[in-house]
Amino acid sequence: MSPTKIGIRAIAAYLPQANLENHELVAQHGFDPDFLDQKLGIRSRHRAAADEHVSHMAAAAGRAVLEQSGLDPAEVQFLAVVTQTPDYCLPQVSALVQHALGLPTSVAALDIGLGCSGFVYGLATATAFMQTHGLTCGLLITTEAYGKIIDPADRSTAPLFGDGACATLLTDSPIFVAGRFVFGTDGSRSDALIARGSGTRKDGDGLLFMDGRSIFNFMMQEIPPSVARCLAANELTMDNVSLCVPHQASSYMLEMLARRLGVPEGRLVVDIEDVGNTVSSSIPMALMRRVLPLASRPASVVITGFGVGLSWCSTILFATENT
């Protein structure tokens, strides 16, 4: 007997109250306003408060999606939390979130330590786990507070990243199911996006370093063939896909990637202006705000995540007949 197909039922988000606005960055660091507004495509980004951590944001997003869906926390059987800025090295963030949400102690809970590719990897992991073990209700929560590991004086990272969390409800009555996945990892380039000294290897100050040029070259080199393999594996072409939702890196990077991918006009989803690059939450945030509210649900959506590791992952979301 084949396992029940698990997929996306609903998505909810949590964004911290505090904003870092472009005029502040211009005043502090002399940024060109056009660079921020046009090339990055970001006007403001959220920042977690000093006493607000990823477990708090994850729990807030999880609570929101359960309330939106009318579910009792006791119904949740699986929890995966994707983050690279955990409250602690141990215990795992998912244990803190399980307690905060009042999920049953029978829940299977785990952390996934990936960044910008984390939602797509997390979707592959969570749906496979749930289907294998006959679970029908789970939460995939992406939560990141890069603002806590960014040097405010670092011009390459300070204007780019925003804090926040998304909770994706996974059930056996989904509105979208994922097709075949294509994965990739290249640890030889891991120093292009790294927080040295953030773990037990005390070789740095724990702050985020990003080689923007290397990350751009990586994206242009690896993501188009990854998406092409994904389309072929799912027996599609870019022309007959409804929408494309890449990781929301920056407006310029999305435009360049869309050209290389051959995304037809009007089918690229960009959702970065008022949230910035929210790392693992960027794809579910865009799905929640730009795809799920559409009056006519798109039949197929390409999603592709890429970043720290370096790592990447692509799949297709197919609409179901569920409402």
Image (spheres, rainbow, N blue to C red):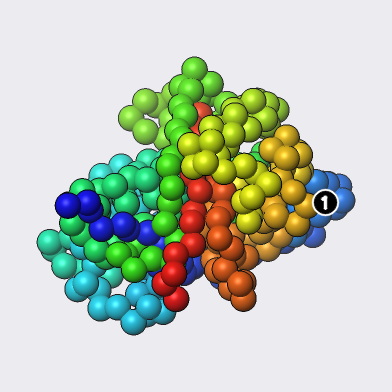
Q: What residue type is labelled 1?
A: Gln
The percent position of residue 271, horizontal first and vertical second, equals 66, 59
Residue under the point 70% across and 55% down: 267
The percent position of residue 58, horizontal first and vertical second, equals 39, 62
Picture quadrant of residue 294: bottom right
Name the side, left or right, on which 151 lies relative to 62: right
Name the side, left or right, on which 289 lies relative to 137: right
Residue under the point 31% across and 57% down: 5
Picture quadrant of residue 142: bottom left
Residue under the point 21% across and 63% down: 77
Q: Is residue 159 above or below residue 96?
A: above
Observer-nearest residue: 87 or 235? 235
Observer-nearest residue: 2 or 131? 2
Residue under the point 59% across and 29% down: 225
Quadrant the C terminus occupies: bottom left
Which residue is under mark 1? 38
Q: In the rendered image, is residue 270 in sight?
A: yes
